[in-house]
Image (spheres, rainbow, N blue to C red):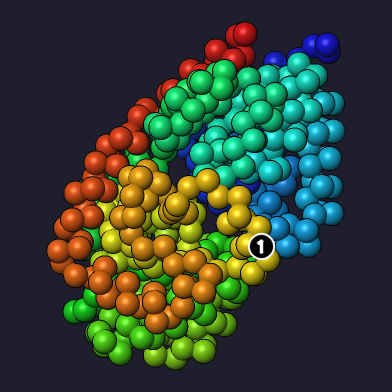
Amino acid sequence: MEKLTSNSIVWTAGENSGDYLASRVLPSLSEAFPQMTMEGIGGERMVADGLQSWYSASELSVRGYLEVVRHLPRILKIRHDVIRRTLENRPAAYIGVDAPDFNLAIEEKVRSTGIPVVHMVAPAVWAWRPQRIHQIKRAVDHLLLVFPFEEKIFREAGISCTYIGHPLADLIPIEPDTLGAREKIGLKTVGPVIAILPGSRKDEIKWCAPEFFGAADLVLKSEPTSRFVIPAADAKRKEEILKVLDQFPAVKEASLILDGQSHTAMEASDAILVASGTATLEAALYKKPLVIGYKMPALSAMLILSKGQTKWIGLPNILAQKSLVPECVQMFCSPEILSSHLLHALEPKRQEALKAIFTDIHHSLLRPTAQLTTEAIEKVLKR
């Protein structure tokens, strides 16, 4: 096998969540290996932490079978280029962050040439496509896990792994400062505050936002003093959100649109309406009652749901192994159903009950993530 270089580590993080998770550990790794150049695919946070970007993480932000097919030529071109650059540069390690559909094929190819591979955020084989565990075993030298129950699954499969805790648990305070968050964004209100997060992708806003804002419109009819806080992932998403809001003038009038600041929006809220994904965990860590909604093209949904291995799609429910919060998917993601659940979420007894459970979940996810990640990667490099 060819000799590895000692002056670079390649990262590939897909989507906003991957960019965020990687940014929590990249500085620690840079400090441990000051001679290393960090390069690859990442978002704004990773670039701010010193990543030399080949492509933006947003290039990989595609969900659903039909949507992937539409973007497949572009994604395959990026994948081919990442493999080419990695094999030419012979880095000290390749670190894939989440995005298993993109990363695993690259990791398998890269590892076969002798380049050490670490993967952060294990593919959810416990939720769907359990056969993928065989590809993981071929593709990675070490797996970094963000949920405690995953250790048993992967160790029994003979995959080297470390539970590093979830970076979000370290970032988000155990006790949220709701009033402080409202002051930070200049939100003054006498009624309930609901954070609405319809997703960070174009397709999510197209499919989820009309249902979410329709629900907000119905909530206003029951609670006229309600205010809504809506974080937009970037300028493009903000434009798309505002276009949908134009169909709901009463909601638009009662809404505060934020540039980013999704965590502040959640912390400022009394309840959260959120698209399925990492944001469901963030909502729980902020100890807020949440309602999960998701809608996508029917064929994509049918194919994805048919491969499901768990009763739930929301991380709070999966971690608790019970239905803590409502999940409204496809035909159930309607304004009428969502608004009914939101009004229930605003009830004080509901808020207190969930706060206690979410606090226990928070403590279970707290670990010195950056330190554990750096130590695990150091061991792989020394091997």
Image quadrant of residue 249? Answer: bottom left
> Dividing the image into 4 quarters, which one contains the C terminus?
top right
- Compared across the picture, whether 120 is left or right of 3 comes to left
Residue 333 rendering spot, x and y as whole percentages: 47, 73
Residue 78, compared with residue 349, is above or below; it is: above
Q: Which residue is mark 1?
A: 300
Mark 1 crowdedness (10 Å alpha carbons): few <14, some 14-19, many ≥20: some
Residue 266 versus residue 333: which sits nearer the camera?
333
**Residue at image coords 27%, 37%:** 363
**Residue at image coords 78%, 58%:** 69
Residue 15 rendering spot, x and y as whole percentages: 60, 51
Residue 219, compared with residue 155, is above or below; it is: below
Residue 234 rendering spot, x and y as whole percentages: 56, 64
Label 1 residue SS: helix
Image quadrant of residue 213? Answer: bottom left
**Residue at image coords 78%, 37%:** 82
Residue 3 versus residue 312: which sits nearer the camera?
312
Instruction: Confirm whether residue 309 shows in the render.
Output: yes
Image quadrant of residue 200? Answer: bottom right
Find the residue positioned furthest to the top: 383
Number of dots carrying numbers: 1
> Dividing the image into 4 quarters, which one contains the N terminus?
top right
- Compared across the picture, whether 151 is left or right of 39 comes to left
**Residue at image coords 62%, 42%:** 129
Residue 242 versus residue 336: which sits nearer the camera?
336
Residue 35, compared with residue 347, is above or below; it is: above
Residue 274 versus residue 228: which sits nearer the camera?
274
Instruction: Confirm whether residue 29 shows in the render.
Output: no
- Compared across the picture, whether 229 is left or right of 202 comes to left
User: Which amino acid, by three-letter code, is at mark 1?
Assistant: Ser
